[in-house]
Amino acid sequence: MVMRVKNRRRFTAIQWKEIKRKMSKGEAKINDVKGYKRLLALHMRGLGKSNDEISEVLGFSSSYITELVSKYIKNGMEAILYSSHINCSQIQFLYVILETNTLNNDCTAIQRLSIT
């Protein structure tokens, strides 16, 4: 009986170092709990855990873990740690900019938007 092993994407040495470095710094723990869980899923996958094992521990579906790995490989760490959704205060800030039609040339408004 021959068992087939799924073709799994593997991290390069550089990618694996980046994941381990982010885990050791704990940056995501402080900034975003969901981002930390996504990073933890990548870390567990790098340790050789299966999608089913990871989903059991973290509560993600197996297919979502595959998506995370693909997203990380294609778009890097920024795509994993930071949410692409904007919050209510950011939307209000955008409305203020649009209504007053003011935006400083030094881009401080954009910097404040990305911070909050």
Image: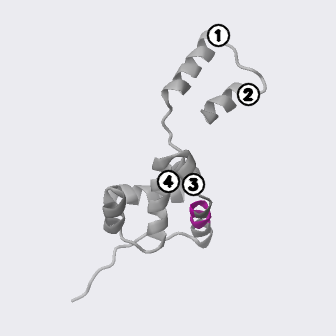
Q: Who is closer to the viewer here, 24 or 103? A: 24
Q: Quadrant of residue 113?
A: top right
Label 3 – label 1 distance at C-alpha: 35 Å
> In the rendered structure, are the residues bearing label 1 and label 4 in contact, judged by CB atoms less than 8 Å apart?
no
Q: Along the polypeptide, which appears first: circle 3 or circle 4?
A: 4
Position of residue 71 measured from the top left corner of the image (x, y, whole percent): 48, 54
Mark 2, secondary structure of its residue:
loop
Q: Residue at x 45, y 48 (%)?
A: 34
Q: Which residues are magenta?
A: 18-23
Task: Tell me if mark 4 has few (under 14), some (14-19) or many (20+) residues whose alpha carbon lies within 10 angstroms of its own.
Answer: many
6 above or below 109?
below
Circle 1 residue = 100
Closest to the camera, between mark 4 and mark 2, is 4
Colour approach in the figure = one colour
Whether pointer 4 and pointer 2 mark residues with C-beta atoms closer than 8 Å, the reply is no
Q: Which residue is mark 4?
A: 36
Magenta-drawn stretch contains 12: no
Label 3 to label 2: alpha-carbon separation = 24 Å
Q: Position of residue 18 (x, y in %)?
A: 61, 64
Q: Quadrant of residue 49?
A: bottom left
Residue that lies at the very extreme toward the bottom in this rendered image: 1
> According to the image, label 2 marks what residue?
107
Q: Are marks 1 and 2 in contact (CB under 8 Å)?
A: no
The residue positioned 66% from the left and 12% from the top of the image is 101
